[in-house]
Amino acid sequence: MAGMGSSPFKKCINPSCNLTYEINNSTLVCKCGSFLDIIYQYNYSRELIHVFYQRRNHGGNIYNESGVWRFRELINFAHLDTEDLEECSRVLVSLDGSEGRQSKPYKMKKVSEYAQVDNDSLLLQPEGYNPSGSFKDNGMSTAVTHAKMINMNRIICASTGNTSASAAMYAANENIECEVYVPKGEIAPGKLGQAFQFGAQVIEVDGNFDDALTYSLKEAQQVGAYTVNSINPFRIEGQKTIIYRALEYLDWNPPDWIVYPGGALGNTSSCGKALIELYNLGWIKKIPRLLVVNAEGANTFYELTNGVFGGEKLTWNRGRPNIRLINDYYKGKDREGVKPHTKATAIQIGKPANLIKALRSIDFTNGIVMQVSDQEMSDGMALVGLNGFDCEMASGAVPAGIRKLRQQEIIKKDDVVVGILTGKQKDPKLSIEYHLNRSNTFSKPPVAK
Ligand SMILES: *Cc1c(COP(=O)(O)O)cnc(C)c1O
Ligand SMILES: [Zn+2]
């Protein structure tokens, strides 16, 4: 097929190391401890955007129906001839074409009014409309594809709930084992229910997400299980398609801003990688600015990049960020016994695994990292609901963040803004509590008869 160069490979992101690894082995993190990128050597032409679009008329082919695999040339780590559908179906993992199928940008009038952005230029993309109810399915389909490519039949993860739901769903569908480490009592009931429902082995950790991740990585190493957290570079590949779908909606004219909530920063990393690759391929000329929104109670990325800690702003610095600053920050938090705390449990993370890759994304896009309160996220979540769309509290960080930057006049009124609503509501208690409380701006309390 045209544009097909030599095989992709994995490469360490640390320029002082630069080690490479072949795709078909189980190495997910470099020997030096740094994360890996998937590097492609294809030179696909921009004309492919028409092929991507035509595939929406899928004719029953699940790899065209899938909003992930529809863009398979841009995530072709399996080095397939992507037009040979039989070859694709032997390798690519899909939940019957449903991942990414229903998520694309929508206009939400009440949110644009609230954020004071023109209605035509604010676009929100509900990734909660994925089969397991969050954006995680985009990257899980690709990670499980790689697991199968190297014959792993046991996957493992730590999760604030949505990663485990997604992993368990794909594992069940592919008939492989799945173990999920969750912080006990700190994940939404709807998410925990999914892990059980899909037959995963749940391991409840007496600690927070950061502790659960430590345990699961240790276990993975001991038993030879395959980690599907976002430290896994194949997760990052699938999540690039979130951006492709947004760009497709805009006829591949990049917006001015792309906005995500920030948790472990896998999304932030994948967005940056997607844009870097499209730019290098010459498919886009303009680079959107990335806005990452932390919860005030889990604001590591915000504090480090804004120089709140140690007086120095942490930056990518051409692949050589100040690691000592990061370690000192974590040591300080541990010493003071400070744990991340927010009702938006999906982003209640103190040590974002993808911090370094996320710095690269901020650097490439001249991005901004900010923080919002739990109240602001709840208001954002409620407003999305008032437009007929469902999202969870962590996703509420997106409208809240856009509004704040708009107030500061950093986002202009007619800037084109794409916000990613990462997941749907799986903790109905939060919606009910919000509306029962009259003091909330958008509440509509029930009436008794
Ligand atoms: C996982 C998750 C996040 C955080 O995404 P990262 O890529 O870890 O930053 C945010 N919102 C929801 C709903 C999630 O499930
Ligand atoms: Zn390395």
Image (cartoon, rainbow, N blue to C red):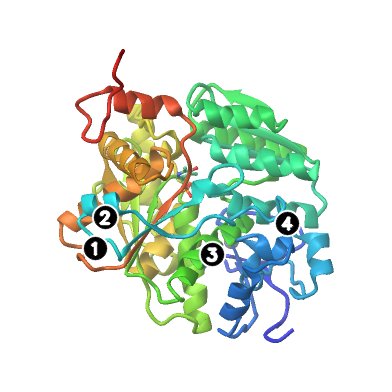
Nearer to the camera, 441 or 364: 441
Is the CB atom of the residue marked by disc 1 within 8 angstroms of ligand 1's nearest atom? Answer: no
Q: Nearer the viewer, mark 1 or mark 4?
A: 1
Residue furthest out toward the top: 449
Image coords of residue 217 (percent x, y): 63, 39
Residue at 73%, 42% (x, y): give it.
171
Mark pair 3, 4: CA separation: 20 Å
- Disc 3 versus disc 1: distance between alpha carbons? 39 Å
> Which mark's residue is nearer the viewer, 2 or 4?
2
Mark 3 vs mark 4: in front: 4
Q: Are marks 2 and 3 in contact (CB under 8 Å)?
A: no
Cβ–Cβ under 8 Å for marks 1 and 4: no
Q: Residue furthest left?
A: 408
Q: Secondary structure at mark 3?
A: loop
Q: Secondary structure at mark 2?
A: helix
Q: Earlier in the sequence, mark 2 or mark 3?
A: 3
Q: Secondary structure at mark 1?
A: loop
Residue 328 visible here: no
Q: Check disc 3 and report the residue beneath it.
A: 13
Vertical side of 194 occupied by 226: above or below: below
Pointer 2 or 1: first along the chain: 2
Q: Give the mark nearest the N terminus, 1 or 4.
A: 1
Q: Quadrant of the N terminus?
A: bottom right
Q: Is mark 3 within 8 Å of ligand 2?
A: yes
Q: Which mark is residue 112?
A: 2
CA gap between label 2 and label 3 equals 38 Å
Residue holding disc 1: 118
Residue type at mark 1 is Asp
The earlier-in-sequence mark between 3 and 1 is 3
Determine which residue is flagged by label 4. 146
Marks 2 and 4: CB-CB under 8 Å? Answer: no
Name the element at disc 4: helix
